[in-house]
Amino acid sequence: MQILARIGAALVALFGLALGLWFFFATEQAAAGFFVTPQGAAGLSTLRADMSSFFLVGASFALHAAVTGRGAGLLVPGALYAVAITGRAVNLAVAGSYEGAAVPMIVEAVLILLCWFGWRHLSHRERSSRP
């Protein structure tokens, strides 16, 4: 199970790395992929900073968990994606449904499950190795 947990953590890391680098280096294309329109240089700067940091910080913690086998690192990306899916759920309740609304929520739910699975199985290893 620990190998599967590390693979799951690596998948979370790769996903975050890909999206973080996309927002960092191809901000306008990434924004369009997320249905966001930046307003001038300030908007591009905000997206480049905030969106890339969201994904890259989560990716770095997931990668740390995958490499070291320490499940606590998965709490960070798990929390990030939990807040994201909560925001989407609130938006559905307030603004209503829209075409394609389920896709990002499914992706976030899978990422949360991978983080939970990795945290649970890798944290068990941490607890059992303590004196």
Image (spheres, rainbow, N blue to C red):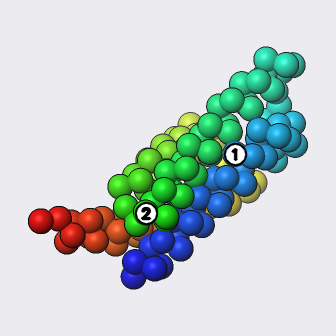
Give the mark nearer the N terminus: 2 vs 1: 1
Number of the label disc, if any, that sits on residue 20: 1
**Which quarter of the rendered picture does the C terminus lie within?**
bottom left
Q: Eyeballing the image, is 107 above or below 29?
A: below
Quarter of the view holding residue 119: bottom left
- The kind of residue on which mark 1 rests is Gly
Q: Residues within 10 Å of mark 2 (few under 14, many from 20)?
A: few
Farthest left residue? Answer: 131
- How many labels sit on residues? 2
Farthest front residue? Answer: 131
In the image: residue 104, left or right of residue 93: right
Q: Could you tell me residue 62's position as x and y percent? A: 51, 56
Task: Decide if residue 88 is in sight here.
Answer: yes
Residue identified by numbered label 2: 68
Number of the label disc, if any, that sits on residue 128: none
Of 51 and 86, which appears nearest the observer? 51
- Which mark lies nearer to you, 2 or 1? 2
Q: Eyeballing the image, is 105 above or below 131?
A: above
- Which element is circle 2 on? helix
Quarter of the view holding residue 108: bottom right
Mark 2 vs mark 1, CA separation in Å: 22 Å
